Image: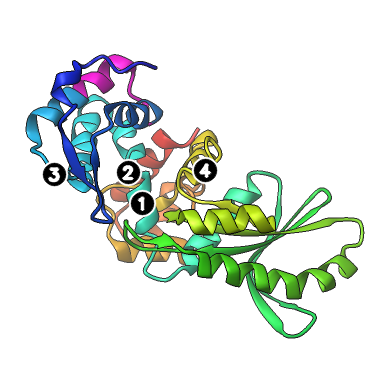
Amino acid sequence: MTYNIKKHTTMKTKVTKASGAIEDLNPGKLQTSLVRSGADREQAEEIIEKVLREIEPYTSTKKIYRLAKKYLGQFNHASGLRYSLKRALFRLGPSGYPFEKYFGELLKYNGYQVSIGVIRKGKCVNHEVDVFAVKDRHVSLIECKYHNKAGIATDVKIAMYVHSRFLDLSPVIKSQYPDKTCTAWLVTNTRCTSDAVQYANCTGLKVISWKYPDNEGLEKMIEDKRLYPVTILSGVKSGLIKILIKNNIILLKDLAAIESKEIAAILSIPENKALTLKQQAGELSP
């Protein structure tokens, strides 16, 4: 897909990332994210034009995100919510356990049998495995590294830690599942440093993070089957989100499948508000 806005409007535009790094604005990247969220090409270009008129050099990517979301929501409410995906993952915190449960749900929709937070015996010591997943001839030992704000990358020390635990666990797992292969995964809702990725590639550790691997990252895994978390809903207080997750209502699909009366009872809210939540969930989940 080609971005058509005149080059002179963007060539000298610098933006500030959440990490504090400065880089050139990439309108093509912004366009891709808008189209992925449901805008058509013309809408995406119009949104970018509006955003460009409102920003100055070194504007934060956070502000650019907010502007793009605002204008996207004017075209289509559901598309505007989908554009909130990265923020929705941050709202799963502050602890990492909801993210572990959420990632487990993603795997279930991809055919895995999943257990969350299980203790497994290693050759030397016992280990708590965030997500233990089995599918066909594969056993996956998954460590989830959750961050509740942007700009924090998972570094090589974490990758080395995950790999060392795997070396202790794998002999026992292989003896218990002799007909299956055993692999370790490192999953994060942000990014991994280049050293972490290099180490993972060298040792056979599978990494899934935001936009990594290319076209197979966490956001692609979510968007392909519209497995959005309930935290993507707008105007829902964090306390209500915690209640939903506590009741294993983690995906919008889960919320859309429940009667509004049941939602009202779980959240102790009026049924008309529960119906609104159910309708919003239905807009985003097929």
Q: Earlier in the sequence, mark 3 or mark 2?
A: 3
- Disc 2 secondary structure class: loop
Label 1 amino acid? Ala
Work out how far the residue at label 3 is from the one at label 1, CA to CA, in angstroms: 25 Å
Q: Taking 220 as reference, is 141 above or below it? A: below
- The answer to whether 96 is drawn above or below residue 82 in the figure is below
* Badge 2 amino acid: Ser
Disc 4 to disc 2, C-alpha distance: 16 Å
Q: Is residue 242 above or below residue 284?
A: below
> Horizontal placement of 213 versus 273: left or right?
right
| Residue kind at label 4, given as amino acid type | Gly
Q: Nearer the viewer, mark 4 or mark 2?
A: 4
Residues drawn in magenta: 37-47
Could you say which quadrant of the image residue 236 lies in?
A: bottom left
Residue 43 got which mark? none
* Left or right, residue 124 beside residue 130: right
